[in-house]
């Protein structure tokens, strides 16, 4: 790895090449350093499942998995993710790993406009991967950084709670 | 809003990071977790020409025992405060504070060193370095130094860090068998900034408090130790009379600023209530 080259300062608006593994696929794209990961995913890679809401880490609509952990894709630049593994709601949906969560959200009307849902699902997926059967209080705590302006959260908590219990019993929630 | 255009440099070593900063000066910013810096850039509160990414510097990682201290690498993420066994054993106050730091996804990225460097007066960890009598290790153009947390926080978002300097680790004295701790905060919404928060570490002989350090956050321009309240408790056993004396002493220790949302008198009141609760818990944890 070479040291810092001052010429870099004259190239602030020029794009740089980044590579990551997105939803299991190796991709490379050209981004300006100031382009956030969410903008890169949506605009360059056309993965529009991830939503850009507040763009300051408050609403949780932009959550993706970075090297297996849920992070705000609006709170990092794509260049920072160079070399990382990223899983978006698009990939999590296609692979079927959250199919039970999605079905339960649908069944219990845990969404209305759906804007917050990708972030809710990424977060719920992370919670259930860490805590086998979270209490309702733990679910609420985990969702504290995800805003939903339609549902009032109750149905979302219900859905996650039901999936956690069903997974532990080895069946499906519905 | 979007950040102003900047250049990006990923440093592999502390030396590379310091060199890059030295060349560019005030227009450069170190970025680690970026959970406070990225929003500041998006809002254009700051507009650096160069971001120096320090997250790939191995020397800034890791938690290990070193002498009588736990050395917590600056890049230790908030979520690791919850999962790292050494933190649970030797710095349990930090583990107790961690669930209150923002939300889970922020904790997956945000770093301990970054939180201390920013010195947000409403943040949990900077205040806890005071309660723990921690030392902050700093690398800079003129070499490395260690400074007590007591001497680190100077004013609003102002610390002893000089331009171009970087926190490399935080040293926390190892938690001992005769010590007790307590932490809590009051916030309107889970994960939101606290109206008032407090953490404390006491060294006890039976019921008697031989030493105690109490630190508040969200009470002024900096995280604040309440030395008057501490003095009323040291050398005494924890009873309701002493607790009331410590609560009364807060009036001299704290001077919350004028604020439309939370008037100073209300904040002081909440601080007294919180102090009473935590001292009560400290007594029960004997």
Image: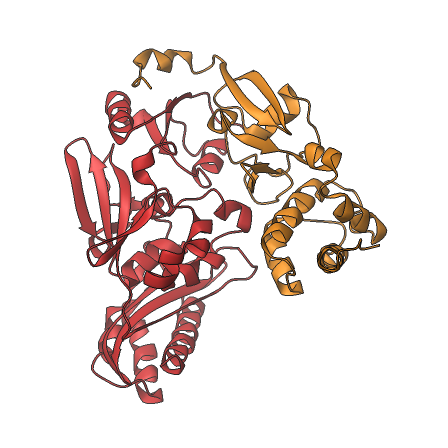
* Residue A165 screen position, x and y as percent: 73, 60
What residue is rendered at 27% in x and 41% in y? B168
Number of numbered callouts drawn: 0
Q: Is residue B246 left or right of residue A111?
A: left
Place of residue B209 in the rendered image (x, y in percent of width and height, measured from the top left): 25, 80
Image x and y of residue B277, in percent = 43, 77
Above or below, comparing residue A137 to residue A111 in the picture: below
For the view shown, which residue lies furthest in the left direction?
B142
Q: Residue at x 34, y 58 (%)?
A: B127
Name the residue nearer the viewer: A154 or B269: A154
Q: Colour of chain B?
A: red
Indicate whether B241 appears above or below B203. below
The one of B93 and B64 positioned closer to us in this rendering: B64
Q: Which of the two residues, B257 or A90, is positioned nearer the viewer here?
A: A90
* A8 sits left or right of B107 in the view: left
* Residue at the image point whose x is 18% and y is 47% from the top: B146
**For residue B190, side relative to residue B25 (left or right):** right
Q: Quadrant of the C terminus of chain A?
A: bottom right
Figure quadrant of the N terminus of chain A: top left
Image quadrant of residue A65? top right
Indicate the position of residue A44 as horizontal and vertical percent values: 63, 19
| Chain coloured orange in this rendering | A
User: For the view shown, which residue lies furthest in the front direction?
Assistant: A170
What's the colour scheme? by chain
Which image quadrant for residue A156? bottom right
Residue found 61% across the figure and 52% down from its top? A127
Quadrant for residue B16, please give it: top left
Whether residue A10 is visible: yes
């Amino acid at each position: 790895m070479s040291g810092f080259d001052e010429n870099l300062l004259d190239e602030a608006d020029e794009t740089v090449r980044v590579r990551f593994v997105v939803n299991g696929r190796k991709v490379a794209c050209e981004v300006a350093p100031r382009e956030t990961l969410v903008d890169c995913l949506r605009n360059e890679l056309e993965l529009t499942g991830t939503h850009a809401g507040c763009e300051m880490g408050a609403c949780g609509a932009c959550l993706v998995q970075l090297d297996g952990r849920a992070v705000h894709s609006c709170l990092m630049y794509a260049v920072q993710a160079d070399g990382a593994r990223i899983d978006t709601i698009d990939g999590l949906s296609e692979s079927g790993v959250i199919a039970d969560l999605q079905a339960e959200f649908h069944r219990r009307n845990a969404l209305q406009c759906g804007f917050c849902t990708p972030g809710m699902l990424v977060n719920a997926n992370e919670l259930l991967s860490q805590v086998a059967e979270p209490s309702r209080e733990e679910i609420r705590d985990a969702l504290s950084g995800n805003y939903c302006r339609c549902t009032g959260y109750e149905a979302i908590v219900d859905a996650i709670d039901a999936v956690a219990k069903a997974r532990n019993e080895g069946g499906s929630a519905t | 809003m979007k950040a102003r255009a900047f250049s990006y440099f990923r440093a592999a070593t502390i030396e590379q990071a310091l060199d890059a900063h030295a060349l560019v000066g005030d227009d450069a910013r170190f970025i680690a977790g970026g959970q406070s810096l990225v929003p500041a850039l998006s809002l254009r509160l700051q507009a650096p020409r160069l971001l120096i990414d320090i997250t790939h510097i191995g020397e800034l990682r890791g938690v290990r025992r070193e002498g009588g201290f736990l050395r917590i690498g600056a890049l230790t993420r908030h979520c690791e405060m919850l999962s790292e066994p050494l933190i649970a054993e030797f710095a349990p106050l930090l583990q107790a504070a961690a669930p209150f730091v923002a939300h889970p996804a922020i904790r997956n990225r945000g770093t301990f060193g970054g939180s201390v460097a920013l010195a947000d007066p409403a943040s949990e960890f900077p205040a806890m370095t005071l309660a723990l009598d921690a030392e902050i290790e700093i690398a800079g153009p003129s070499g490395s130094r260690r400074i007590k947390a007591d001497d680190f926080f100077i004013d609003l978002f102002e610390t002893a860090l000089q331009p171009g300097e970087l926190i490399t680790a935080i040293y926390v004295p190892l938690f001992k068998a005769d010590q007790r701790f307590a932490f809590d905060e009051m916030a309107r919404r889970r994960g939101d900034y606290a109206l008032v928060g407090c953490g404390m570490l006491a060294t006890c002989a039976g019921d008697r408090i031989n030493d105690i350090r109490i630190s508040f956050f969200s009470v002024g321009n900096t995280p604040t130790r309440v030395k008057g309240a501490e003095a009323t408790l040291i050398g005494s056993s924890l009873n309701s009379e002493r607790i009331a004396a410590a609560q009364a002493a807060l009036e001299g220790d704290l001077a919350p600023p004028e604020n439309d949302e939370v008037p100073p008198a209300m904040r002081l009141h909440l601080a007294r209530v919180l102090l009473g609760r935590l001292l009560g818990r400290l007594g029960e944890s004997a």
